[in-house]
């Protein structure tokens, strides 16, 4: 049986203060925020109550269509005073949110991206 294609719709990440973390993601990614949920066009970040930080923080990534977009996000986070770890020759940047979860913004030059 052939399976249908799947699309990631949401991610849950641990937070001691879910509402504050959702607001943080909402502010930086221009998302709508309702309580512990930050959401945008077809996706959702659900900040879930965690009494203490996990030993293994969440890690998730946002893929972009170009290296130039990665550079623009790097400049934005630099301007916000948020530490940026640049990797893969500048094609990926990693940041840590206020709860210690790691998120990545990257461009993969080996993946074909159709023109829009």
Image (cartoon, rainbow, N blue to C red):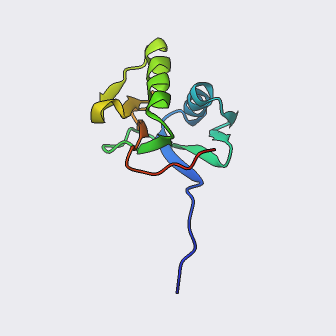
- Report the residue that reaches farthest toward the front: 115
Near-viewer residue (42 or 71):
71
Q: Find residue 108 and report its horizontal and vertical position in percent.
A: 40, 44
Q: Find residue 98 and report its horizontal and vertical position in percent.
A: 45, 27
- Report the residue that reaches farthest toward the bottom: 1
Q: Find residue 52 and report its horizontal and vertical position in percent.
A: 40, 38
Near-viewer residue (52 or 46):
46
Question: 42 left or right of 7?
Answer: right
Question: 25 left or right of 110?
Answer: right
Is residue 62 visible to the viewer in this orientation of the structure?
yes
Q: Residue 93: name its quadrant.
A: top left
Q: Find residue 16 and report its horizontal and vertical position in percent.
A: 48, 35
Near-viewer residue (81 or 35):
81
Is residue 50 visible to the viewer in this orientation of the structure?
no
Residue found 46% across the figure and 20% down from its top: 77
Question: 11 left or right of 99?
Answer: right
Residue found 52% across the figure and 87% down from its top: 1
Question: 32 left or right of 53?
Answer: right
Tag count: 0
Residue found 67% across the figure and 36% down from its top: 35
In the depicted structure, whether residue 13 falls above or below residue 85: below
Near-viewer residue (39 or 105):
105
In the depicted structure, whether residue 16 falls above or below residue 42: above
Residue found 45% across the figure and 40% down from its top: 51
Quadrant (top left, top right, bottom left, bottom right) of the C terminus: top right
């Amino acid at each position: 049986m052939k399976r249908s294609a799947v699309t990631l719709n949401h991610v849950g990440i641990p937070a001691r203060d879910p509402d504050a973390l959702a607001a943080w993601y909402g502010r930086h990614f221009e998302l709508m925020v309702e309580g512990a949920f930050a959401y945008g066009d077809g996706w959702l970040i659900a900040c879930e109550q965690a009494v203490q930080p996990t030993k293994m923080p969440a890690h998730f990534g946002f893929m972009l269509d170009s290296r130039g977009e990665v550079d623009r996000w790097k400049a934005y986070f630099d301007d916000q005073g948020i530490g940026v770890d640049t990797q893969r020759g500048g094609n990926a940047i990693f940041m840590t949110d206020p709860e210690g979860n790691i998120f990545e913004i990257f461009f993969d030059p080996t993946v074909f991206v159709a023109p829009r």
